[in-house]
């Protein structure tokens, strides 16, 4: 292939990807544009291609920050509490389990690992009705704890941390023991810091999963003031709740924390995935 | 040394002794894995047994009656088969789209001859950050019924009639598959890109020496190297496909015309929660689990994932 030819291939490929990217980003851009259009106009003509750019303003965002948006911010708080709590709890517990499975030879380790893989295959949806019944029995319906419970020891995270820990140097454990470090001290003071990238990758994945989680919160949450964002926004989707101002501006604001989380940990995300997700 | 430690432990059965016991190398791993064991027993094993028990019961508030296989007999009804058919169609299309397109795109994204690679990678991942509900809100508006909705306007520009997207079986399925594909292609691209990092350059050089063209290199070097990732992505896509509920919920809130959007999980939700018939809902769940197991095993066998050399 000649040099010129090669250049043309590059340009063609780049144009192709530019087109794909435009298509992929169209929905997000239309959401942002819609959030700045007057709701009367949206009501009348829907998400039209032909709109008056001069009429764009931040009016819909005022609705979110007015009294109308009170329950929206309550949902926001609930989502922040649940997702924040879950990131902390699930990283803590899942990393412990994954670490032990990778670093210790103990009786039953294989069985436990097989169970982790088995649980990965069991769809949550078949466990949902008995769990729901259990939550009713324990009087936990409509609580933060009940929303978080199924994700606290996520098998995906356990699997991921195990794969990551397999690459850590075991000799460090031995020398720490000689220095008089306890088994837990070894984990918390020496190994956990080495697991940094995997914590970052899992923080993104678990945060994303929990922030966007829908079916279980829909089931377990009863009162408007306990709703998480997806459940709350879904109530705006019903035929009775066509509150367009809140629906669109509220949806845009929903993406903000996820983008922040992503930008914050992005550097480690792909390297973490490379090690954990794919080697099997 | 260890013996003297246990001796002193016996003398004073104190907090210190317990701590030393917990810290031994034999016990510590069990302490570490205890969160999983507890959650397995409480959140998986018990509910799974309970789901099977419930599937043979009529569950009413305050009383449960054993009714044998009655729930399972009731499953054999047209609505269930429609839900199963919808779910199977959805799985079929999402697997094809979410495996094939990301492979091709990731190979291009990995090639040296593409400009702005990192920008494209990041942009294609953005849809994954949106929740199904938020994405569904946009898609519902873009694919609205009126001729003023975004997509119908585009169709109008090429002289086509507006489409009643959410009211036809085919277009309804198209919307669900499109929403899922839009959200997940970027994620799967990342998995494949990660897999491509493990393909050694030497293999391509060797192929070059043998005079292989780009297509042959893709088929005989890239594809075999990506096989573990393909198995992984296909497996999670199939399992997630059978579990689908949200994509359908955002378009129809569980009451689609003629059940065109009803999925198996949607059926569990409708019968188990909305109709409060938990025994029947549990039975549907058990059937769903069996289907997923069979499909996963067949799929993994087909890919040869059980062979030793992998």
Image (cartoon, coloured by chain):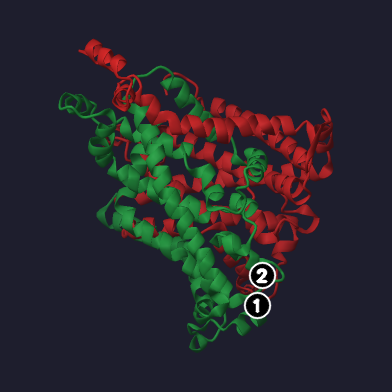
Q: Which chain does red denote in the image?
A: B
Q: Residue furthest front?
A: B12
Q: Position of residue A239 (x, y in %)?
A: 72, 69
Label 2 residue SS: loop
Q: Residue furthest left?
A: A179
Quarter of the picture holding the C terminus of chain B = top left
Which residue is at the front of the view, B67 or B169? Answer: B67
Image side of residue B160 versus residue B280, left or right? left
The residue indicated by pointer 1 is B148
The residue indicated by pointer 2 is B144
- Dot 1 and dot 2 residues touching (CB under 8 Å): yes
The quarter of the picture where residue A196 lies is top left
Q: Position of residue A72 (x, y in %)?
A: 54, 69
Quarter of the picture holding the N terminus of chain B = top left
Q: How many marks?
A: 2
Label 1 residue SS: loop
């Amino acid at each position: 292939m000649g040099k010129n030819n090669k250049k043309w291939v590059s340009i063609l490929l780049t144009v192709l990807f530019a087109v794909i990217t435009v298509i992929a980003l169209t929905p997000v851009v239309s959401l942002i544009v819609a959030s700045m259009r007057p709701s009367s106009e949206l009501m009348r003509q829907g998400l039209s291609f032909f709109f008056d750019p001069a009429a764009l303003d931040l009016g819909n965002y005022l609705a979110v920050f007015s009294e109308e948006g009170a329950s929206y911010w309550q949902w926001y708080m609930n989502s922040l509490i649940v997702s924040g709590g879950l990131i902390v709890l699930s990283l803590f517990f899942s990393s412990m389990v994954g670490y032990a499975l990778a670093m210790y030879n103990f009786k039953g380790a294989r069985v436990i690992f097989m169970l982790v893989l088995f649980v990965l295959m069991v769809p949550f949806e078949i466990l949902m009705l008995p769990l729901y019944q259990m939550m009713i029995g324990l009087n936990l319906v409509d609580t933060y704890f009940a929303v978080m419970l199924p994700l606290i020891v996520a098998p995906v995270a356990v699997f991921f941390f195990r794969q990551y820990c397999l690459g850590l140097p075991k000799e460090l454990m031995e020398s720490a023991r000689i220095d008089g470090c306890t088994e837990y001290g070894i984990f918390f003071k020496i190994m956990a810091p080495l697991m940094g990238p995997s914590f970052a990758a899992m923080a993104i994945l678990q945060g994303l999963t929990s922030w966007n989680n829908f079916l279980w919160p829909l089931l377990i949450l009863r009162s408007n003031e306990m709703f998480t964002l997806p459940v709350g926004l879904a109530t705006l989707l019903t035929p009775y709740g066509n509150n367009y101002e809140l629906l669109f501006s509220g949806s845009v604001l929903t993406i903000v924390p996820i983008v922040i989380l992503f930008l914050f940990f992005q550097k480690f995300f792909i390297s973490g995935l490379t090690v954990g997700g794919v080697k099997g | 040394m260890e013996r003297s430690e246990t001796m002193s432990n016996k003398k004073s059965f104190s907090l210190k002794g317990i701590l030393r016991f917990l810290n031994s190398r034999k016990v510590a791993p069990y302490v570490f894995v205890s969160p999983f064991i507890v959650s397995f027993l409480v959140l998986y094993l018990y509910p799974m047994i309970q789901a099977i028990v419930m599937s043979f019961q009529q569950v009413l508030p305050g009383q449960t009656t054993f009714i044998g296989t009655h729930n399972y007999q009731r499953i054999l009804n047209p609505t269930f088969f429609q839900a199963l058919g919808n779910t199977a169609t959805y799985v079929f299309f999402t697997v094809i789209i979410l495996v094939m397109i990301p492979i091709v795109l990731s190979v291009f994204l990995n090639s040296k001859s593409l400009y702005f690679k990192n920008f494209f990678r990041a942009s294609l991942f953005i849809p994954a950050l949106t929740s199904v509900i938020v994405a569904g809100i946009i898609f519902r508006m873009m694919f609205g019924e009126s001729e003023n909705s975004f997509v119908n306007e585009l169709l109008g520009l090429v002289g086509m009639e507006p489409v009643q997207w959410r009211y036809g079986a085919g277009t309804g399925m198209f919307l669900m598959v499109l929403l899922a594909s839009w959200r997940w292609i970027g994620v799967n691209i990342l998995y494949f890109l990660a897999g491509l990092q493990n393909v050694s350059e030497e293999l391509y050089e060797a192929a070059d020496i043998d005079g292989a063209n780009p297509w042959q290199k893709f088929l005989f070097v890239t594809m075999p190297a990506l096989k573990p990732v393909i198995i992984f992505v296909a497996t999670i896509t199939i399992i997630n496909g059978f579990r689908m509920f949200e994509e359908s919920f955002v378009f129809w809130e569980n009451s689609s015309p003629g059940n065109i959007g009803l999925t198996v999980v949607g059926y569990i939700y409708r019968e188990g929660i909305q109709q409060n018939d938990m025994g029947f809902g549990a039975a549907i769940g058990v059937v769903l689990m069996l289907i997923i197991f069979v499909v996963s095993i067949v799929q993994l066998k087909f890919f040869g994932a059980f062979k030793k050399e992998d």
